Image (tube, rainbow, N blue to C red):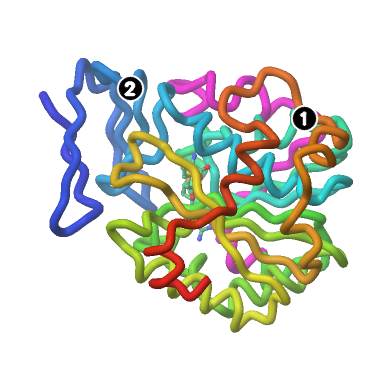
Amino acid sequence: MDWFEETLHQGWRQAIRVERVLFREQTGHQDLVIFDSRDWGRVLALDGVVQTTTGDEFCYHEMLVHVPLLAHGAAREVLIIGGGDGGCLREVLRHAGVIRVTQVEIDPAVIELSRHWLPTLSDGAFDDPRARVVIADGARFAAETRERFAVAIIASTHPQGPGAVLFTAPFYQDVRRLLNPGGIMVSQCGNPAIRPDELVETQAAQAAAGFALVDYYLTVVPTYIGGAMALGFATDAPGRRAISVRELEARGVPAGLRYYTPEMHVAAFAHPRWIIERVGH
Ligand code: SAM
């Protein structure tokens, strides 16, 4: 394989120059490939879609994790659904106030292979005593668990294959139920430039789940092509949405970050007019 050609969008494709394919397997849940690329370091793709690269993963993981954790300010119990490469888990564990992180991943092969081939993603996080991994369908876990969490992070694949269920109103309803008062759910909502419907539909599904505030914020991850990526932000405590830079600083931003700053946090909730017109807010 000289080039990895992503098949996510029907009319627009990105191709990444492959230096060396390291691993390829049909896991039982999805087609998994890991390769070294010329420009983006090591790449993990599932079902033909780039999941993460060592070159730009921080642009995604830092924003998916630190925005809700700092918006909350006192999260102790955190839930991650998906996120098998461990990047989200690594970022959550940077917060000293977090005492337990439960990660529910459907495909154990993603965790095992990422630990082996992309060790910088989890960077030892799976061995942290605060981390607990549950191998299960995240939707099923959300429907059945009696545990409660301050923050739920939906770090899923795109709405196809096993990830499709993680974009539905019944699932969001179950997540809302497992949040403590004042809890926050964030979720991957796709690229609004290429797939605005995905953001429109997930915002509608999250509103239908009953959240008092449903909003989204933006991050730019070069290998998630097409401009900014939308991340859903839903809570029953609307005050969590507008926290000042000064307050975020006072809450204690973890050291060593490369994308997240309190200024980026606040700015990420500013939306271009064309997206506002499309989504309604
Ligand atoms: N690093 C990015 C992140 O953290 O969001 C990339 C996506 S991560 C690799 C997506 C994960 O979601 C995959 O490991 C996949 O197996 C998992 N997944 C997909 N459907 C799921 C489901 N129904 N329940 C739990 N995990 C699921």
Name the front one of labels 1 and 2: 1
Residue 15 or residue 272, whichever sits in front: 272
Residue 149 x, y percent position in the rendering: 81, 57
The image shows residue 244, relative to residue 233, as above or below, that is above
Q: Nearer the viewer, residue 100 or 37?
A: 37
- Span of residues in magenta: 113-141
The correct choice, above or below, for 96 with respect to 80 in the image is above
52 lies left or right of 90: left
**Mark 2 secondary-structure assignment:** loop
In reply to whether residue 124 is colored magenta, the answer given is yes
For this rendering, which residue is in front, 185 or 247?
Answer: 247
Q: Is residue 19 magenta?
A: no
Numbered badge on residue 174: none
Residue 195 x/y as whole percent? 31, 62
Three-letter residue code for mark 2:
Trp
Residue 147 showing in the rendered view: no
Give the SS element for disc 1.
Answer: loop
Q: What residue does disc 1 label?
A: 253
Is residue 76 toward the left or the right of residue 80 in the image?
Answer: right
Answer whether residue 109 is visible to the viewer in this image: yes
Task: Give the answer, above or below, for where 11 lies relative to 57.
Answer: below
Q: Position of residue 254 (x, y in %)?
A: 76, 26
Q: On residue 40, which mark appears?
A: 2
| Residue visible at 55% across and 53% down in the picture | 270
Residue type highlighted by circle 1: Val
Q: Give neighbour class at mark 2: few <14, some 14-19, many 20+ (Cα, 10 Å).
A: some
Could you tell me if the residues under marks 1 and 2 are in contact, i.e. CB atoms within 8 Å? no
For residue 207, above or below residue 214: below
